[in-house]
Image (cartoon, grey):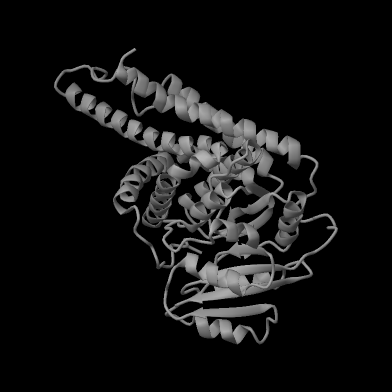
Amino acid sequence: MSYHDLIAAFCFGYPFVMSFYWMSGGVLYHWLRGRHEPRPDAPPKLESYPAVSILVPCHNEEDQLAETLGALTLIDYPHYEVVAINDGSTDRTGPWLDAITATMPQLRVVHLESNQGKSTALNAGALAARHELLVCIDGDALLDPHALTWIVRRFQTDARIGGLTGNPRIRNRATLLGRVQVGEFSSIVGLIKRAQTVYGSTFTVSGVICAFRKRALQEAGWWSRGALTDDVDISWRVQLAGWRIVFEPKALCWILMPETFRGLWRQRLRWAEGGSTVMLKVLPQLHKRPRMLPVWLNYFAAVFWSYAMALGVLVWGASALLSLWGHDLQTLWPGFGVIPQGWGEVLALTYLVQAVVSARIDERFEQGVSRSLFWLPWYPLAFWVLQALTSMVGFWRAVLTLGRTHGTWISPDRGLR
């Protein structure tokens, strides 16, 4: 077998194997935990209701906070506080937060004089929080009224759980990109987090909706100011400190996502660079927690897959150019092409099966999510290409900037509403 046959086999074989890996884990999670559970809007009674602190880091969020804090007033939980951290906002976020405290007694506000980044804001909020359980949401997220009950219930099931990732759902769907992301968060994100919970190690919490024990954060060293992706960084350090991180799909949170290619590119590039930075930094510590090694290896397998796909497309393009001068299109790379054929068609069918499986599992968390299957054929074209490009660029940016800090943040693209 030639080298190009091996690369072609990896290009089509890796996503094929991983798809069945995620599907089996997702189905197993549903079988073990989900099929007999009550619906998200009907949580069971808890033995106790410990107080919870909700941290809301904010930077220039004046247009979003009315919705976010309004949703928090509807939380169906007896004992909770809201700590909003104004991280050096230059708009009216600070005065608006101060004004709303008069009508929202559970709200406390922490002001940081300058923009120091989300990690610093979360650390400030954690120090100001009165309670052991911390729930973290973004300044544009709408937390479901029953989310706190499900989060607390999951922490009560296992004292080894140090962190928890909730279930973000897309609420802006004005464009094709927005609709495709609805399917992505169901068929990719939700399925992967279920599988990782079953297999024992989680790559990352969702920064837009997650929760931690203070003790776990303290043992992990709190949030790192230098982290570009604070959620990936804290997830690995909490698990390397010996704690578990799990997925709670019934802890719903409605979020805004980019709906332009420019906004999506910037978001996914930041995710790729931040993820690669964390993977490079944790390598010397993996011997402490060998169970994290499969997740680490899979990350770099995905990066290698991106380069392999890029090489395949470049060679295919060269072959196409050569064919204009009478050469066979398959001269340089027999069997490889951008149009699905053979195993490519099998891979496309496998992805469709994965989408159907995940939609069936997720239907109880979001009615009508199966309608997003109509848009999923666009996913490989739009998102696999985007993922491959951002992985390649993000990896080298991580290598070149390793050790630098990322202290500030900017307001992201939140789509068309």
Which of 275/332 is in front? 275
Q: Quarter of the image holding residue 371? A: top right
- Front-lying residue, 198 or 18: 198
Residue that sits furthest to the top in the current view: 1
Q: In the orientation shown, which residue stands out farthest toward the front?
A: 288
Vertical arrangement, residue 12 with respect to residue 52, above or below = above
Is 271 or 182 nearer to us in this picture? 271
Q: Height in image: 261 above or below 123?
A: above
Q: Nearer the viewer, residue 260 or 165?
A: 165
Q: Position of residue 412 (x, y in %)?
A: 43, 63
Residue 354, image quadrant: top right
- Report the residue at 45% width, 46% height from top: 282
Q: How many marks?
A: 0
Task: In the rendered view, tell whether residue 416 sits above or below residue 167.
Answer: below
Task: Confirm whether residue 340 shows in the render.
Answer: no
Q: Position of residue 343 (x, y in %)?
A: 45, 21
Q: Is residue 124 visible?
A: yes
**Residue 135 x, y percent position in the rendering:** 64, 63
* Residue in the picture at 31% in, 34% down: 310
Residue 358 horizontal side relative to residue 157, left or right: left
Q: Quarter holding the N terminus?
A: top left
Q: Is residue 61 left or right of residue 323?
A: right
Q: Position of residue 99 (x, y in %)?
A: 59, 87
